[in-house]
Amino acid sequence: MKTKYLALNADLYSYVCKCRSNVNDPVLAALEEKNDSLGDVTSKQQIGPDQGSFMTLLVAAIGASSAIEVGTFTGYSSVCIARGLRAGGRLICLDVNTEWAAIGRPYWKMAGVEDRIDFRPGPALQTLRELEPGQQFDFAFIDAEKTEYEAYYELILPRLRPNGLILFDNMLWAGRVSANAPLDPQGQAIVALNRKLPNDPRVETTLLTIADGILICRKH
């Protein structure tokens, strides 16, 4: 079988980002501009616009009413997820950095999703262990400390309803997952999870090349 893929360049990626429903969204554009002002290193923590649009579509397509996000940054992804939720839906956002969340709150309000978002500050693993008994989710997005990805997964999966989705960000680790060069601990954790999940009988998985790699798990 011949390989079938297309390498992106800046022009093609720009074209891709224009072929989405929320291309002229003023809230996301304003938040993206705010994130850019934080500096190159920090602003890179924001997901891409194509990724955000994809997640909104997925959340809406599965009819999600309950979602959780591990790693919120300034809330760009939160807006995208919350917009896809059914009426009365709820998104729990976990992040240890309250200053970044404070930046995002005005944009949540501007987007009309502030009442759907429940921000819980603190270490994510601790917060996940302290979730209310019986709390279940339709959708989860994980984009935080990579060495803790597997632990997040094991805590969230039992709370995910059948056919619910878990998305992991940065699963290509800037392309380094397929290189022969030594990986840092975060890269090693990603590679280990990429090996584990396709063989986990509890889920069905696929790894997409959107952004820095999005791995999707569907719970059986």
Image (cartoon, rainbow, N blue to C red):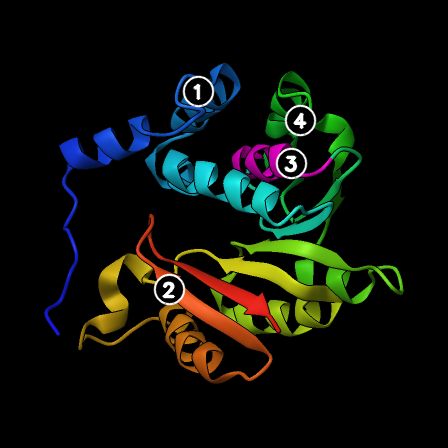
| Amino acid tagged 3 | Ala
Residue 203 at x, y percent in the picture? 56, 75
| Marks 1 & 2, CB-CB < 8 Å contact | no
**Is residue 87 rendered to the left or right of residue 51?**
right
Which secondary structure lies at badge 2? strand
Q: CA distance from mark 4 to mark 3?
A: 13 Å
* Residue type at the position of mark 1: Ala
Cα gap from disc 4 to disc 1, whole angstroms: 15 Å
**Element class at badge 1:** helix
Q: Which residue is mark 3?
A: 82
Q: Residue furthest right?
A: 133
Q: Nearer the viewer, residue 192 or 5?
A: 5
Which residue, given by chain and number where applicable, does mark 1 sit on?
A: 29
Residue, disc 2: 207
Q: CA distance from mark 3 to mark 2?
A: 23 Å
Q: What residue span does the magenta drawing correspond to?
A: 74-86
Kindly identify the residue that appears in the image at 68 percent across and 47 percent down: 64
In the image, is 202 to the left or to the right of 28? right
Place of residue 24 in the rendered image (x, y in percent of width and height, measured from the top left): 41, 16
